[in-house]
Image: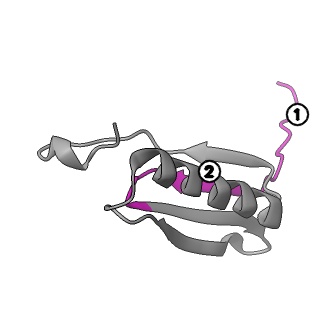
């Protein structure tokens, strides 16, 4: 059996949403994973959709530049009961 290589990466996870887009960054530490950044990006529901999407793009790009993650993971949009809460 061959040797196993473990590569530690700095991950930025994104929970997509139009009104509230959550994020969290996790880095491997001496005692296991450690959260290094968490937050929510918000857009105003009254603003036009193109403006809201552009705002999210700007804020996510700035977050990526600030944190410099090795990888970005985006959660699949899931909805069960209220379809109106899902992003278009």
Label 1 environment density (alpha carbons within 10 Å; few <14, some 14–19, many ≥20): few
What residue is shown with label 2?
57
Q: Nearer the viewer, residue 85 or 29?
A: 85
- Start-end of magenta stretch: 1-20
- Give the secondary structure at mark 2: helix
Against 34, is 84 above or below?
A: above
- Taking the magenta stretch, the answer to whether it contains residue 3 is yes
Out of 83 and 38, give the one closest to the viewer.
83
Q: Would residue 4 be found to the left or right of residue 15 on screen?
A: right
Q: Nearer the viewer, residue 80 or 29?
A: 80
Q: Tell whether 27 sits left or right of 85.
A: right
Residue annotated with mark 1: 3
Q: Secondary structure at mark 1?
A: loop
- Note whether 75 is above or below 61 in the view shown: above
Q: Residue at x 66, y 64 (%)?
A: 25
How far from the left and from the top, in percent, is residue 11? 70, 55
């Amino acid at each position: 059996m061959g040797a196993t290589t473990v590569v530690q990466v700095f991950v930025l996870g994104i929970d997509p949403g139009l009104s509230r887009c959550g994020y969290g960054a996790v880095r491997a530490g001496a005692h296991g994973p450690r959260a290094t950044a968490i937050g929510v990006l918000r857009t105003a529901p009254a603003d036009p959709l193109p403006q809201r999407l552009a705002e999210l793009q700007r804020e996510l790009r700035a977050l990526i530049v600030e944190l410099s993650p090795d990888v970005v993971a985006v959660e699949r949009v899931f909805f069960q009961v209220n379809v109106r809460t899902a992003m278009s």
